[in-house]
């Protein structure tokens, strides 16, 4: 064999080699083309069997580790945790942070800045958590010893030990009878405040004691739909929260941990802050707020805890959101896209007023959510990885076999497109593009509806007049409007968005404490079939006449994945099994009546909730997604005759296949697929020596 010049010593005789480019790529978390380039330009220690072809390679992990630690790369895009193959735009955005040298340390990947600025010298980005079920809604303990998180396998409150990565469940909700959200550790790290989604379809505020393993409901009011905790006061006596009220007002308040009473600091309208940050001395609350009713851009405000004084700290035409405070309380950290890319900025603050102008601390950070700043100045934040996009394919209408395999529907804004739908005449396809979401704009909550001509490929953009918009749309059969979930001054729910102007009219209002989901147009565009959850019952199938408001129940069972037949007379739904051991496809008359079971799938086979489900254009078959435990990926696309019979594989299988729509020609289909995976990173030593030394 040929020895690589970078090999330092013979590998231990009992070390198992990595015996292919694929295994080496998985070990280094890079794609194969990058490894081959590194072999030529940087001496990656790869060996070859002389008697086999050139592609037959092997490598020893110990040699790779040694080479990695010594490596001094030139300027090049990075692919973190497999980003090169799964989300190229995200990888490039993250690589553009600075010229980075790479080394491994601790329990994750470490990126060290080679820049020598006063603020950036010695800055380290450390991967804290990657893989399935990463929770980005939690927060680090003040000493960074653990992350308070939700265990999304069970919905329980949990802590993740930072050094070891071990997750320990704290609560026992008993088969998803509720779940924890937005956990925040107390200043001494001994308690965790969190919101709990209860069986009444409401949230209450709870505190868990790590010392006694006990839970106490601190705050619950019928008029408050959602109390979200953000911080504790320095003495641990109160919790800073935002209160989303049933009358649609939002409030910034302090909840007394001992008495459960709430002191309102400020009452806002239907719009809400994205983040509240309490200054380390407990005197001020920083919050962000939309600039206008129809604006996604935010400015930053500072509110004295007594509520007597409020200052506009950061005002700029672009988007600015609160991230947190430096440990000494002298600077407020905020995220901004004013340079065209996301950056972390710091504004000096004293006595509740801004001192000077903001300073850019870190450019081009692919920030998804700020999780918190620890006492030593380490900033925890989340990023999103993986590719989720829209795809087109073709199936033979008679056999169900694949004619053309899935290909991306559009080459634009890869990874940020969702929820395709055909026009009734089949000449156009529409989809939602979240092109203003991170990493282009921090905290953006809007979307653009894109209409693409099948004949010319030309695209027309529609910007809905909504303050926030979800990621799914349904095109009305008359072609005049789209159905989209969102918020504006008139309410929250599903809006009919004009296909010409983007004007949005509330069609299906959410009435707290319940919510609505999965609406489907009737064939005359005058009614909506949808699922409603209330404190008394969840996911009941209903129909509402839009003009009169007449509303009635269609099916009194827990349902999901609703699709209407081409003639508008029947619906196919996914039903849950009371014992949780099976999932069912059933046909339901649109006028109401008993459900006819079409297919029953028993675990480990699963019909995933909210996955792909559609009728063929001739109404003879149902297309549906199926997967199996424990991986639950990929989703395979199947079809089954409406009259009953054995199901049949189509040959299409992709992760997270959903939003399935069939073209009127009966062959072409479009759908969303892919998974948005999250990662948590820690940014160390970027605040300067004064803050880091505290």
Image (cartoon, grey):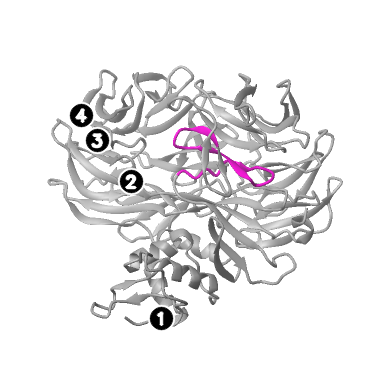
Residue in the image at 75% along x and 44% along y: 301
Residue lying furthest right: 351
The answer to whether residue 197 is visible is: yes
Task: Give the number of the disc on residue 633.
Answer: 2
| Element class at badge 3 | loop
Q: CA distance from mark 2 to mark 1?
A: 39 Å
- Which residue corresponds to the image point at 76% horizontal and 29% vertical from the top-left? 237
Q: SS at mark 4?
A: strand
> Mark 2 or 4 closer to N-term?
4
Mark count: 4
Is 140 one of the magenta-colored residues? yes
Q: Earlier in the sequence, mark 1 or mark 3?
A: 1
Question: Which residue matches tag 4?
Answer: 598
Residue to which mark 3 is pinned: 566
Q: CA distance from mark 2 to mark 4?
A: 23 Å
Along the viewing direction, whichever of 319 and 163 lies nearer the viewer: 163
Q: Secondary structure at mark 1?
A: loop
At label 4, counting other C-alpha atoms closer than 10 Å, the crowd grade (few under 14, some 14-19, many 20 or more) is: many
Which badge, 2 or 1, is on the more N-terminal residue? Answer: 1
Q: Which residues are magenta?
A: 133-158
Tag 2–tag 4 contact (CB < 8 Å): no
The residue under label 1 is 4
Q: Position of residue 509 (x, y in %)?
A: 50, 28
């Amino acid at each position: 064999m040929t020895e690589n010049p970078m090999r330092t010593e013979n590998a231990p005789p009992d070390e198992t080699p990595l015996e292919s480019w694929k295994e080496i790529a998985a070990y280094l978390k890079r794609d194969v083309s990058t490894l081959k380039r590194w072999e030529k330009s940087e001496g990656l220690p790869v060996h070859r069997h002389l008697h086999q072809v050139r592609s037959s390679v092997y490598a020893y992990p110990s040699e790779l580790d040694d080479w990695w630690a010594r490596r001094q790369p030139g300027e090049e895009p990075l692919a973190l945790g497999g980003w090169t193959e799964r989300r190229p735009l995200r990888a490039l955005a993250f690589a553009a942070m600075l010229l980075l040298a790479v080394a491994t340390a601790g329990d994750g990947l470490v990126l060290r800045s080679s820049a020598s600025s006063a603020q950036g010298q010695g800055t380290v980005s450390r991967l804290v958590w990657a893989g399935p079920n990463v929770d980005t809604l939690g927060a680090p303990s003040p000493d960074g010893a653990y992350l308070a998180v939700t265990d999304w396998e069970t919905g329980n409150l949990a802590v993740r030990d930072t050094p070891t990565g071990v997750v320990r469940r704290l609560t026992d909700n008993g088969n998803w009878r509720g779940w924890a959200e937005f956990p925040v550790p107390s200043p001494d790290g001994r308690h965790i405040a969190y919101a709990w989604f209860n069986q009444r379809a409401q949230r209450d505020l709870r505190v868990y004691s790590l010392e006694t393993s006990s839970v106490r409901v601190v705050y619950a009011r019928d008029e408050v739909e959602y109390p979200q905790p953000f911080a504790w006061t320095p003495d641990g006596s109160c919790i800073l929260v935002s209160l989303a009220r049933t009358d649609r007002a939002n409030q910034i308040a302090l909840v007394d941990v001992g008495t459960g009473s709430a002191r309102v600091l400020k009452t806002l309208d239907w719009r809400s802050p994205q983040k509240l940050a309490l200054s380390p001395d407990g005197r001020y609350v920083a919050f962000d707020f939309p600039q206008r009713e129809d604006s996604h851009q935010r400015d930053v405000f500072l509110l004295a805890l007594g509520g007597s004084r409020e200052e506009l700290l950061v005002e700029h035409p672009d988007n600015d959101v609160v991230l947190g405070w430096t440990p000494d309380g002298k600077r407020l950290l905020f995220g901004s896209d004013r340079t065209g890319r996301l950056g972390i900025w710091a504004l000096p603050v004293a006595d509740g007023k801004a001192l000077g102008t903001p300073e850019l601390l870190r450019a081009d950070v692919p920030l998804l959510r700020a999780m918190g700043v620890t006492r030593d100045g380490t900033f925890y934040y989340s990023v999103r990885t993986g590719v989720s996009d829209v795809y087109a394919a073709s199936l033979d209408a008679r056999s169900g076999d694949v004619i053309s395999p899935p290909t991306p529907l559009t080459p634009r804004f890869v990874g940020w497109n969702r929820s395709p739908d055909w026009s009734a005449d089949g000449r156009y396809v529409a989809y939602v593009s979240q092109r203003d979401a991170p990493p282009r704009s921090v905290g953006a909550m809007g979307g653009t509806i894109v209409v693409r001509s099948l004949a010319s490929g030309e695209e027309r953009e529609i910007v809905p007049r909504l303050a926030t918009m979800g990621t799914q749309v349904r095109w009305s059969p008359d072609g005049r409007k789209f159905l989209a979930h969102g918020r504006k001054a008139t309410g929250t729910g599903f809006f009919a968005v004009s296909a010409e102007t983007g004007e949005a009219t509330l069609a299906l209002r959410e009435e707290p404490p319940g919510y609505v989901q999965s609406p489907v147009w009737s064939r005359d565009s005058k009614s909506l079939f949808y699922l409603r959850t209330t404190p008394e019952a969840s996911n009941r199938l209903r129909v509402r006449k839009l003009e009169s408001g007449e509303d009635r129940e269609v099916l009194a069972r827990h349902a999901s994945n609703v699709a209407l037949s081409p003639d508008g007379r029947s619906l196919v739904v996914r039903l849950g099994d009371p014992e949780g051991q099976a999932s069912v496809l059933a046909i339901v008359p649109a006028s109401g009546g008993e459900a006819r079971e079409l297919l029953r799938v028993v675990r480990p086979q699963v019909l995933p909730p909210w996955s792909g489900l559609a009728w063929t254009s001739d109404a003879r078959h149902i297309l549906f997604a199926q997967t199996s435990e424990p991986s639950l990926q990929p989703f395979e696309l199947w079809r089954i005759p409406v009259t009953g019979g054995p199901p049949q594989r189509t040959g299409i299988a992709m992760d997270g296949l959903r939003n399935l729509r069939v073209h009127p020609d009966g062959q072409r289909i479009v759908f969303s697929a892919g998974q948005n995976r999250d990662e948590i990173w820690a940014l160390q030593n970027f605040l300067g020596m004064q803050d880091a030394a505290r």
